[in-house]
Structures are given as C-alpha cells and as structure tokens.
Image: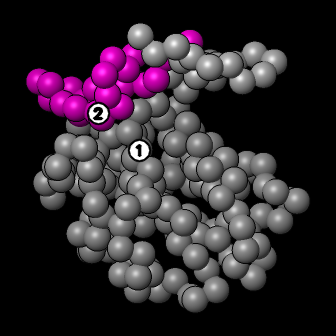
C-alpha cells in the first residue's frame, strides 16, 4: 500500500474485536511516532503503552466517545490497547505539532500492521494521570485506542454536514470537498450556492 492509499484508508474505529494486538506491533507503532519530526529536534514526547486488562478498563471509563453519535462502545467492543502520548514540560512548553506528527506516524504504522485506531482528546486527563501514575512535569496530550476493527468506517464527500453518522453498522465520515478548501497563489472567496 502506498502512502496516499494509506492516508485515505485510515479511519477512526471505535468498536474493536476482543483480540489483543501483538506487543511487537505496538512497539513498532511507538517507534514510528518516536522518529517523527520534532520542533528544534527537542523530542519532548514519551509514550505509555497500556495492555493490562484492568488498566484498559479504567481508562475506557474515562473516555467520551463519538460525540456526534451520542453513543459509546460497549465493554465487549473496547480497545485492546492504548498509547498515552505525553509531553515533558521540562523540555518544551509547546509541542502540539510534535504530537500531531507523531500520532499520524503511529496510526498509519498501526494500519499497515492491520491494527485500527482512534485518536482521543476527549477524556478525563486528571483521572487518566492517576491511573497511569504520570508525574506532574509530564502532560498527557492524547490517547490512541488500538485494536482489531469490529466495524467499518468509510470516508465520503460532505453534502450538508460534517457530522459523522452510522447506517447499517457502517460509520460514514463526511469530508469537505477539495474544491471548497484549496486556493492557489492567494486566498480567493468561494461562492456558496
């Protein structure tokens, strides 16, 4: 699979088979995140890989899932691993670009390994900090839920709304049309029809 195909194929998955991803594959995904570009090459990010069933269950309860759907996966659809992305505040007070680049590397690598993912920013950071014993000088930036997909997600051209929706157990994810967001040489107004 080439890079363009991988980018188009990767979708957020929120229902997982209850089969654990192999530790070696998770390590490969973190390694892909590790080698992502870093502003001034400061490399402030660290990662906690969570595979323990009890810890996963605690984290699962602190996540807000799929806001547009007003739905949560059941415990028997829960992710089988998480990676917490941490930023060392002693190294960098910023790091949002590092986080985005690292996470994209991670989820594309996971997809290549047959592992689905969901990047999560909506969770109780205080409680997850306690669960994972994260020290105060580390900031929890994101969680990445990982596992083998138990649902299908498809991208489609946006018609009237950006809100994703489910039909017949398939998650549909509208994306803005390229012609509506691309500009050449300078910004040009688009006429809404």
Looking at the picture, does residue 58 appear above or below residue 34? below
Bounds of the magenta span? 151-179
Q: Which residue: 62% across, 50% down? A: 100
**Element at badge 1?**
strand
The residue labelled by disc 1 is 117
Q: Position of 70 compared to 97: left or right?
A: left
Residue 98 falls in which quadrant of the image? bottom right
* Residue at (56% x, 12% y) in the render: 179
- Quick one: 145 or 182, which is closer to the camera? 182
For image coordinates 53% across by 72% down, the residue present is 140
157 drawn magenta? yes
Q: Residue furthest right?
A: 40
Q: CA distance from mark 1 to mark 2?
A: 16 Å
Residue 28 position, x and y percent, is 60, 48
In x, y percent, where is residue 32? 66, 47
Bin the neighbour count of mark 1 within 10 Å (Cα to Cα): few under 14, some 14-19, many 20 and up: many
Q: Can residue 138 be seen at all in this image of the molecule? A: yes
Residue 9 x, y percent position in the rendering: 46, 24
Residue 78's tag is none
Locate residue 172, reporting x and y percent: 28, 26
Q: Quadrant of the C terminus?
A: top left
The vertical placement of 109 against 33, above or below, is: above
What residue did someone put label 2 on? Answer: 164
Front-lying residue, 29 or 4 = 4
Disc 2 crowd rating (10 Å Cα; few below 14, some 14-19, many 20+) is some
Q: Quadrant of the N terminus?
A: top right
Q: Earlier in the sequence, mark 1 or mark 2?
A: 1
């Amino acid at each position: 699979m080439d890079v363009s195909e991988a980018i188009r194929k990767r979708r957020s998955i929120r229902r997982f088979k209850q089969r654990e991803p192999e530790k070696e594959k998770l390590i490969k995904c973190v390694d892909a995140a590790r080698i992502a570009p870093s502003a001034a090459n400061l490399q402030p990010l660290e990662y906690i890989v969570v595979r323990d069933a009890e810890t996963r269950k605690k984290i699962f309860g602190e996540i807000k899932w799929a806001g547009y759907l007003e739905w949560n996966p059941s415990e028997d659809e829960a992710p089988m691993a998480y990676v917490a992305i941490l930023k060392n505040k002693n190294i960098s007070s910023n790091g949002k670009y590092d986080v985005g680049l690292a996470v994209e590397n991670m989820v594309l690598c996971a997809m290549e390994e047959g592992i689905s993912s969901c990047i999560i920013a909506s969770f109780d950071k205080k409680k997850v900090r306690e669960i994972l014993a994260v020290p105060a000088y580390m900031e929890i930036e994101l969680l990445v839920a990982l596992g083998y997909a138990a649902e299908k997600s498809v991208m489609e051209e946006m018609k009237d709304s950006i809100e994703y929706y489910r039909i017949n157990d398939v998650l549909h994810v509208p994306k803005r049309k390229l012609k509506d967001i691309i500009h050449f040489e300078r910004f040009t107004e688009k006429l809404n029809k």
